[in-house]
């Protein structure tokens, strides 16, 4: 991995970490504030009790989902897809020279195997001929 790609991944990771921490802290604050409320609080009650930001999030659950929960889900899915792609694309640790040396060694071993089989076959045929000729002589 080159330095440019590595630096980009570090920057994206740091940005993701900031987003995750901020979203989780705000989500926990909204959950804790929402649990202490009466069953059907008014929007004015939320704003008075919890301040403008948390009160606004309590009054607008769809926007809370869009701004804080959905980014966490998107980050989770994107990181999962990237992890799967990275696992499938893992490069070999062998250099091109090592790969060529392994290929040459495999060719050499294959040639030796073929020559050994040819010699064994030639010896077998020679024995069969000698056995056949000696059995004919005895007849």
Image (cartoon, helix red, strand yellow):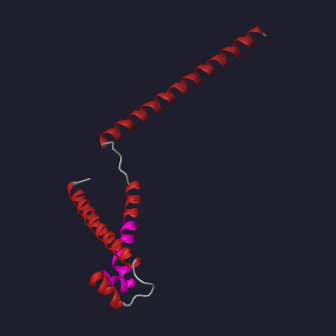
**Rendering quarter of residue 84:** bottom left
What residue span does the magenta drawing correspond to? Answer: 54-78
Q: Taking the image as drawn, is residue 70 in sight?
A: no
| Magenta region includes residue 63 | yes
Residue drawn at (40%, 54%), measured in percent from left and top?
87
Furthest toward the right, the residue is: 139
The C terminus sits in image quarter: top right
| Residue 9, percent from left and from top | 26, 60
Image quadrant assignment for residue 75 = bottom left
In front of the other: 57 or 50: 50
Q: Is residue 112 left or right of residue 56?
A: right
Residue 76 is a magenta residue? yes
On the question of residue 97 being in view, the answer is yes
Question: From the viewer's perspective, is residue 12 above or below residue 127?
Answer: below
Marks counted in the figure total: 0
**Residue at position x 33%, y 79% in the image:** 67
Residue 109 in the image: x percent, y percent? 45, 30
Residue sitting at the far top:
138
Residue at 42% from the left image edge and 84% from the top image edge: 38
């Amino acid at each position: 991995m080159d330095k440019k790609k590595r630096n980009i991944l570090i920057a994206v990771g740091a940005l993701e970490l900031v987003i995750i921490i901020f979203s989780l802290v705000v989500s926990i604050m909204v959950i804790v504030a929402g649990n202490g409320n009466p069953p059907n609080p008014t929007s004015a009650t939320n704003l008075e009790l919890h301040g403008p930001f948390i009160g606004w999030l309590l009054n607008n659950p769809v926007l809370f989902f869009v701004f804080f929960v959905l980014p966490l889900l998107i980050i989770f899915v994107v990181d999962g897809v990237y992890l799967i792609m990275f696992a499938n694309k893992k490069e070999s640790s062998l250099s091109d020279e090592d790969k060529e040396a392994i290929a040459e060694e495999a060719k050499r071993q294959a040639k030796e195997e073929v020559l050994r089989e040819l010699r064994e076959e030639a010896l077998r045929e020679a024995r069969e001929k000698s056995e056949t000729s000696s059995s004919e002589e005895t007849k």
